[in-house]
């Protein structure tokens, strides 16, 4: 199984919390994110851009 850094796991946790609160929005059209898998993908993408250790797509 792929290994994720603690920082990446924390980022995904924060993004999922934002989704549950209804604050997470899609970047392209600004709609609320309601799909859990999409929220995880957003969190991992943000973690990658910060330079955290995240496996390739």
Image (spheres, rainbow, N blue to C red):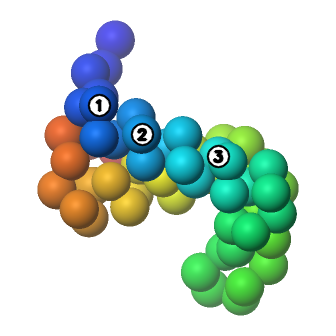
* Residue 54: x %, y % from top left: 26, 40
Kindly indicate the quadrant of the structure image that contains residue 22. bottom right
Q: Residue at horizontal 62%, vertical 85%?
A: 28
Between the residue at mark 3 and the residue at mark 2, the CA separation in whole angstroms equals: 10 Å
- Determine the residue located farthest toward the top in the rendered image: 1
Q: Which mark is residue 10?
A: 2
Q: Is residue 38 visible?
A: no
Answer left or right for 36 relative to 39.
right
Position of 15 with respect to 1 (left or right) is: right
Q: Quadrant of the N terminus?
A: top left
Helix, strand or loop at label 3? It is helix
What's the residue at 19%, 40% (across, down)?
Answer: 53
Q: Are marks 3 and 1 in contact (CB under 8 Å)?
A: no
Q: Nearer the viewer, residue 34 or 16?
A: 16
Q: Which mark is residue 16?
A: 3
Residue 8 visible to an observer of this rendering = yes
Q: Would you say the residues marked 2 and 1 are in contact, meaning their CB atoms lie under 8 Å apart?
A: yes
Alpha carbon of mark 3 to alpha carbon of mark 1: how far? 15 Å
Q: Quarter of the image holding residue 5?
A: top left
Q: Which residue is mark 1?
A: 6
Q: Secondary structure at mark 2?
A: helix
Looking at marks 3 and 2 on the same chain, the residue that comes earlier in the sequence is marked by 2
């Amino acid at each position: 199984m792929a290994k994720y850094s603690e920082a990446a796991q924390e980022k995904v946790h924060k993004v999922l919390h934002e989704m549950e609160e209804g604050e997470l929005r899609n970047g392209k059209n600004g709609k609320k994110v309601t799909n859990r898998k999409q929220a995880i993908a957003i969190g991992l993408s943000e973690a990658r851009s910060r330079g955290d250790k995240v496996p390739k797509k």
